Every structure is written in C-alpha cells, then in structure tokens.
Image: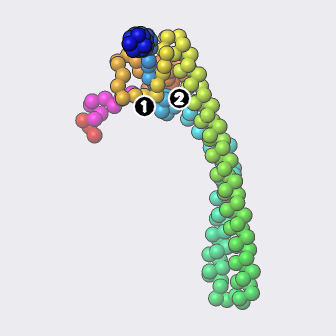
Amino acid sequence: MKNIAKATALSLALAFASASAMAEENIAFVNAAVVFQNHPEREAIGKTLEKQFKADADKLAASKKTIDGKIASLKKEAKDLRSADIKKREDEINKLMRTHDENARKFQQNAAKAEREETAKLLESIQDVTNKMAKEKGYTYVLDANSVVYAAEGKDITEDVLKAVGGKLPEAPKAEEKKAQ
C-alpha cells in the first residue's frame, strides 16, 4: 500500500512540475516561406545567377539552332543525296545532339547547384535572425507558421524577422483596386 501511495504522490508531483514548466514556455511562430519570398537579396541573387549562366545558356541555344538547321537542311536535300551521304550527315547530327544533350545536362546541374547554394545562404540568414530575435524576446520555441494549428495573437514574428533581414511585407491590394477589377 505504501508503494501505491508513493507512486501516486510521485505521479502528481511530476504532473504539477510538467504543467508549471509548460506554463513557462514562450512560443512564437514565423512564416519562413513569406520571409524567404520577400527577402531583399532574393531578387538580386536571381539576377546574378541569370547573368552568371547567360553565356552558357546562349551557347546551348546556338547549338540547338545549329542542330535544327542541319536537320532541316538534310530533310530538304535528302531526295538529291546518296544514302552514304545521308548516313554521314545523320551521324554528324547525332554526334552534335549527344554533345548538346551532355552540355545541357551539365548546365542544368551547375545552375541547380548554384541556386541551391544561394538558397541555403538565404535560409541560413533567416535562421540566424530568427534565433537572435527569439533569444532577445525570450521565446523558448519558434515554430514554422505552416505547422501551427493555432496561435495567440502577437506571437507571429514573421514581419519582425523580415524587417531584420531588410525586407518588408508586400502591401495588400486596396479595397478600391479590388472593386475596379
């Protein structure tokens, strides 16, 4: 009987302790996707990547145009050529297509890798700002808003994080503009 009483007392003590610990938790949430979409560096990074890969993209486009021209030329002249000449030109076109496809694959891999690296840098900056803000404001946890079912007003720090990284939320369309549409 003493063991049951001790176990009950211990269970009640743990329940009260965990309840008081939970009451001390200060939880906020942030919509990381909104912060990412409105990050001031995002557009600049996109332009930088576009500029970085423009020459390669232009080479691929020129290569494709050359291949398309050779195919059109072969179709047009095929009736006047010997089968050996047709075979020779088809082999040349196939070789160009394989080279083009390999270059396109490499281009896509390099562009995707560069984009992932830049995205990771932006996400890291958002994480750093969120961590700093959570420490400053005394939040025990900061959850992503997409995984929060309910939150009390005032616990959304999305706009604060966005301001801290140098961005701002886009303005909502005005009522007059909605009526005009």
- How far, Cα to Cα, is label 2 from label 1? 21 Å
Nearer to us: label 2 or label 1: 1
The residue drawn where x is 44% and y is 19% is 28
Q: Which residue type does callout 1 highlight?
A: Ser
Residue 133, given in percent of the width and then of the height, sits at 52, 15
> Where does the magenta region start and end?
171-178
In the picture provided, is 88 more to the left or to the right than 65? right
Tell me the element at label 1: helix
Q: Identify whether 140 is placed above or below 120.
A: above
Tell me the element at label 2: loop
Residue 95, given in percent of the width and then of the height, sits at 73, 70
Residue 164 visible to an observer of this rendering: yes
**How was this image coloured?**
rainbow
Residue in front for this viewpoint, 160 or 73: 160
Farthest front residue in view: 1
The residue drawn where x is 28% and y is 35% is 178
Residue 100 picture quarter: bottom right
Residue 57, given in percent of the width and then of the height, sits at 65, 53
* Count of all numbered marks drawn on residues in the image: 2
Q: Is residue 52 a member of the stretch shown in magenta?
A: no
Residue 124 picture quarter: top right
Residue in front for this viewpoint, 58 or 118: 118
Q: Is residue 176 a member of the stretch shown in magenta?
A: yes
The residue tagged 2 is 39
The residue drawn where x is 42% and y is 31% is 147
Residue in front for this viewpoint, 87 or 69: 87
Q: Which residue type does callout 2 highlight?
A: His
The residue tagged 1 is 147
Q: Residues within 10 Å of mark 2 (few under 14, many from 20)?
A: many
